Image (cartoon, rainbow, N blue to C red):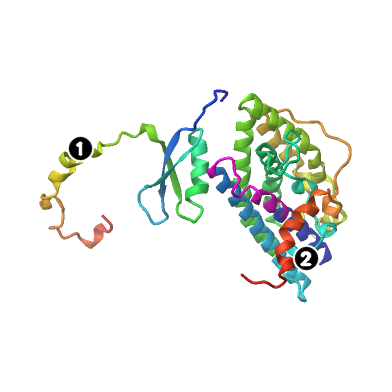
Amino acid sequence: MSAAIDYLLHLADNALVLGQRNAEWCGHGPILEEDIALSNVSLDLIGQARLLYQLVAALKGGDCTEDKLAYFRDTHEFRNYTLLELPHHGPLSGYAQSSLDYGTTIVRNFLYSALMALLWEALEKSANADLAAIAAKSLKEVRYHLRHSRDWLVRLGDGTDESHARAQASLDHLFAYTQEFWAHSPADAAAIAAGIGVDVTTLRADWDAIVDAALNEATLQRPAVSGYVTEGKQGIHSEHLGFLLAEMQSLARAHPNGVW
Amino acid sequence: MSTQLKEWPLWEIFVRSKQGLEHKHCGSLHAADAAQALEMARDVYTRRQEGVSIWVVESKAITASNPDEKGELFDPAADKIYRHPTFYEIPDEVGHM
């Protein structure tokens, strides 16, 4: 039971945190169509998170609800990959709120979608029937997210000198965080043993193939990564998640049980 | 892909609904090329389940009739009611026509 809860929270928090990040583009997209596209992606992810939180709430029982899980847990209780909580500020664009970097957004969505396109497919065979059903629904959504982000990755990489440089810088900045994909947490190990979860290391060769083919088409260099492996899925986060949660949770905490 | 365009070309978007037999014009958008126009049309024009198929056509590929010639082009048809096949009985087996 606990193995399932921890694993489902990891999947749910991934979707919610990246959904919240993508939602930051709403009203600020580089062009109208992309504004709508990013909002669509965001709503898909938040929809996935809701289904997973509802499942966790049902397993936990008592007075647990999806809203309690999303809005009343603190930083150390979130189980998302560190990659997904990072701001959209690319390494070349500083840290001003006004300088959201679309290349960073696209590269991150691509790296994560490439993983989830494989993971949701594998999770269709999960021993947990509810999770298998959520995986089937999410797979269609993430395949589009992958298509959207891959298309832009190629356009930016194989675009102008500036778009190429910025896409490469975003890739160099973010790629090290993908190491966390392949490092099993105790929750991962328990979920795999219970047949609920998937051993992601079995997906790595396929992920490499998707990433390498896209980077090749985009004329971008795959960075060699090593060193510190982030541990967001074990609750050890960067300084950025606290700010994200503060913004996302403030309304629900200011008006507990509010209905609108 | 290295040529820089100041403005992306305009594309006309046609969507076929689930029940519809034909693609209907639903709007236009700017995109760098046809593939991108298709992706964007999906996000802009089908997010409320409007369609099951999309066509995109670059606006400049469309030759339009001149609104000033409306009179000579279309008015002469106004009093030719016999051109409507309303005087036939359609057998049930024919179905939708």
- State whether discs 2 and 1 lie on one chain: no
The answer to whether B9 appears left or right of A19 in the picture is left
Chain under callout 1: B
Picture coordinates of residue A209 (x, y %)?
70, 35
Residue numbers of the magenta segment? A17-32
Query: Could you say which disc has been placed on residue A72 in the image?
Result: 2
- Tell me the CA gap for discs 2 and 1: 66 Å
Mark 1 belongs to which amino acid? Answer: Glu
Question: Picture quarter containing residue B67?
Answer: top left
Q: Residue at x 85, y 55 (%)?
A: A235
Q: Nearer the viewer, residue A116 or A219?
A: A219
> Which quarter shows the C terminus of chain A?
bottom right
Q: Which residue is mark 1?
A: B69
Q: Is residue A16 above or below residue B57?
A: below
Q: Position of residue A134 (x, y in %)?
A: 66, 59
A236 left or right of B56?
right
